[in-house]
Image: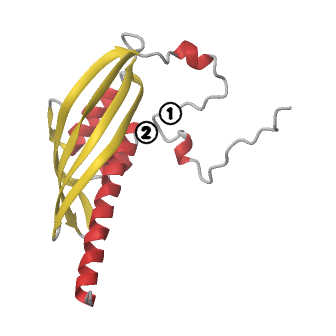
Amino acid sequence: MTTDVELSERVARLEARAEIFDCIQRYARGMDRRDRPLLRSAYHDDAVDDHVGFVGPVEDFIDWAFAYHSTQTRYQHYLLNHTVEVNGDEGHAETYYLFVGTDREPANHMSLSGGRYVDRFERRDGRWAIVDRVCVVEWNAESTSLLTEEILALLPDIKSATHDRNDPSYTRPLTATRASANP
């Protein structure tokens, strides 16, 4: 039989794991939407990110990352396997990622990369956030994208992403355009 103390500890551990995963998701969404406040919320003020050749404080990392992504027309960060060990107010997480991006120059040059975010989290004043991150690249591949701007132009009803707060994911309340049924 589970005691109240054991149940309380289990709930606290599950809550910590969920808050840490929410933080990882804020990172990916903030990066893909180039939403600085959202991305910044994933880190504590004194955080350091070691990320594909960049090592430094979080503010400088965000500047570096946004400059890199400004050279791309499309990009997405996918989050995959996620594990976290929580010990009091500290957590260590490993999250697999898949990155896909299409460069402006050369046109339609596509980068694919897979790896892991290895993070140390701390809970400070009730908020979990990254203190240290090491981005481990497991593999990288490049090719020519099949989805060119010309092909996208042939699909007039396709919804395009924007890398700012004009993206449909920020619309509140979200309302899908309702078209009359085609006969």
Examine the image and state in which quarter residue 14 appears: bottom left
| Rendered residue at 31%/35% (across/down) | 98
Q: Residue furthest front?
A: 1
Coloring applied to the structure: secondary structure
Q: CA distance from mark 1 to mark 2?
A: 7 Å
Q: Left or right: 37 with respect to 85?
A: right
Q: Quadrant of the C terminus?
A: top right
| Image x and y of residue 145, in percent | 42, 16
Say which mark, if any, is on residue 33: 2
Nearest to N terminus: mark 1 or mark 2: 2
Q: Left or right: 48 with respect to 79?
A: left
How many labels were placed on the picture?
2
Q: Residues within 10 Å of mark 1 (few under 14, many from 20)?
A: some
Q: Which structural element holds mark 1?
A: loop
Residue 51 seen in the figure: no
Circle 1/circle 2 CB separation < 8 Å: yes
Q: Which structural element holds mark 2?
A: loop
The residue singled out by tag 1 in the image is 162
| Image x and y of residue 76, in percent | 39, 34
